[in-house]
Image (cartoon, rainbow, N blue to C red):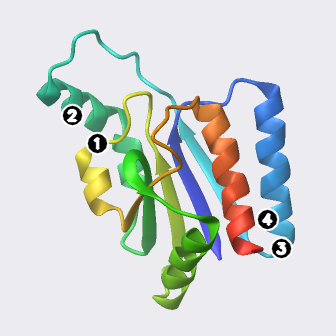
Amino acid sequence: MYFQILCIGKIKEEFYRRQIEEICTKLQKGQHKIRIIEYPDSPVPERLSEKKREVFLEKECAKLAEKITARDYVIALCIEGRELSTKQHRRYIEEAAMQEFETITYVIGGSLGLPENIKKRANLCMSFSRMTFPHQIMRMVLCEEIRSALYL
């Protein structure tokens, strides 16, 4: 199975980069391919109206949206998504494989999240928690969760 993570923001801390790399290496040894594509985040203007917020999100995440194809099973990570157990997550991965999707694509937005167009395109909106966590931690947790779901 082929996985990709499309995300806004770079991992700055060496510790998290090494952890993510180690998890991805383990996945690839198990015959699963994983690719992480990062795009820079944009400075967030102060006092955005809801309409301007959505325009900002669409612009910030435009490159993410361009990478999503019709053959991708898209899982958008967003706070309002469904909280799943690892077993439930695995069932979605299995469902995507049965439907012959080429890639399972996880999408992580910037500090303000994802625009509606990406959430609507998603096959699943998933949340790890109603809490907010730094992106570098969540990206590491996502990689580990993918590995755990595959080897459950």
Q: Which residue is drawn at 51% across and 90% down?
A: 98
Please, what is the three-letter code of the amino acid marked with disc 3?
A: Gly
* Label 2 Cα crowd, 10 Å radius (few <14 / some 14-19 / many 20+): some
* Dots 1, 3 in contact, CB < 8 A: no
Amino acid type of disc 2? Answer: Glu
Q: In this view, does 119 lie above or below 33?
A: above
Say whether residue 149 is left or right of residue 8: right
Who comes first in sequence, dot 1 or dot 3? Answer: 3
Residue at 63% x, 66% y: name it: 86
The tag on residue 30 is 3
Contact, CB < 8 Å: mark 3 with mark 2?
Answer: no
Q: Write the residue at 68% across / 69% down.
A: 149
Mark 4 and mark 2: Cα distance apart in space:
35 Å
Residue 115 disc label: 1
Amino acid type, callout 1: Pro
Mark 1–mark 2 Cα distance, whole angstroms, equals 6 Å
Quarter of the C terminus within the rendering: bottom right
Q: Do the residues labelled 1 and 2 touch (CB within 8 Å)?
A: yes
